[in-house]
Amino acid sequence: MADKKIAIMTWLYNGNYGTLLQAYALHTFVKNEGYEVENINYRSSLKTKLKNWFVNRNSPALFVGKFKEKFSKKDSVANEKRNENFSDFLNSNIKLTELASSPEELVKFGNSFDVFICGSDQIWSPYLMNPPYFFSFVPDNKPKIAYAPSFGVTSASAKKEKMICDFVKRFDYVSVREKQGSDFLKKITGNKYSVMVDPTMLLERKDWEKCIGERIEKEKYIFCYMLTYNAKYVNAVKEYADKNKLKIILIKNDTGFENTGFTVVEDAGPQQWLNYIKFAENVFTDSFHGAIFSVIFHKELVLFKRFCDKSGASQNSRIYTLTEMLDIKDRIADESSLEKIGNMKTIDFEKTDCIMQTNSKKSGDWLLNALEKACSK
């Protein structure tokens, strides 16, 4: 069945390290199994984004946040280099179709492939509702597989729940990334769906080490990767670094870090991001993928809780699923538990390796079984 053409659809252009690395991982896993695979090169235009936001009544807060994030980044040499590093990684490691910038341009791909896989990350978030990522452009008779997409949140409007239900029922094989996502789908579809690991865990540590290159920073350091600025978290990192006489290297995705005294790296692409995790003494992060790679590379981790659990926009479900699976729930810290940093029990990486290997094999087998059945149709 390896002569079948496989298309993968996931986010490629949001400038997030974990997002691009999960796209790379899924593409690489399928390719390594002997399939001919391409990622659908979808980069929606501003007009398309505005239309989708309006038609699907997506979250104004999230849209404004993305807008501010895009235009807050200075038109600097460092930012241009960062974009170049992302582009180089994408184009060097993932085979892409020709570019499409609107749903109408995606239609041509509907009959160009034999099987369609939509990838992971929060591509199914109701707050960012976007029908192409549910394969709205793919004919009914084409096999469709959902591998570990995330909803990010656990509730949606009745209208969006109906939309999601109708889209999901067009799929032949469906898995999700979080238990809460499975519960959400059970509520709206009546069916129970399996929880699979993030694509980044389908590859082994040795596979990721091929992407890293030579060590960048020669001094001993803490690696800090924060998606959202939190002054209390910043102070906790400072205190730990001062106590242990370690340098702090920060890759930031938010404003507020300018006067921390951290060594700020602004031009890192995915390869450099992995490099900083791999060679760090410790990792402090509020990132789901930052946590995954810390465990892959055996780094003592502090995982800051980024959202309030009571918030309807909370995305904490993904870190709960991950830490429960790996039995490292004690590595989560919030503003009320910062005093435990420095006194956490050392992570048993032999145990986490075993857990990850077991769950990764189960997830990989699920995907390969779905692919085999889809290709035989």
Image (cartoon, rainbow, N blue to C red):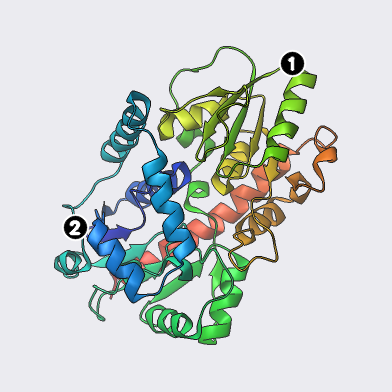
The reply, left or right, for residue 183 in relation to residue 32 is right
Q: What amino acid is labelled 1 in the image?
A: Lys
- Residue 340 lies, in percent from the top left, at 84, 39
Judging depth in this view, the residue of 253 and 340 nearest the camera is: 253
Q: Position of residue 14 (x, y in %)?
A: 38, 49
Vertical order, 224 against 115 (above or below): above
SS category of the residue bearing label 1:
loop
Which one is earlier in the sequence, the residue at label 1 or at label 2? 2
In the rendered structure, find residue 215 and report the number of the disc placed on it: none
- SS for callout 2: loop
Query: In this figure, what is the number of numbered marks?
Result: 2
Residue at (42% x, 52% y) in the render: 66
Residue visible at 67% across and 24% down? Answer: 281
* Image coordinates for residue 183, horizontal then vertical, percent: 61, 76
Amino acid beneath label 2: Ala
From the image, tell me which residue sits under label 1.
Answer: 245
Query: Hey, which quadrant is residue 212 in on the image?
Result: top left
In the rendered view, tell whether residue 207 sits above or below residue 306.
above
Residue that numbered label 2 is attached to: 100
User: Who's the residue at 31% across and 58% down the image?
Assistant: 8
The location of residue 294, given as percent across then percent down, is 61, 37
Residue 209 in view here: no
Quadrant position of the N terminus in the picture: bottom left
Q: Quadrant of residue 319?
A: bottom right
Q: Judge from the rendering whether residue 210 lies leftward or rightward of residue 100; answer left or right.
A: right
**Image position of 368 with respect to 79: above or below:** below
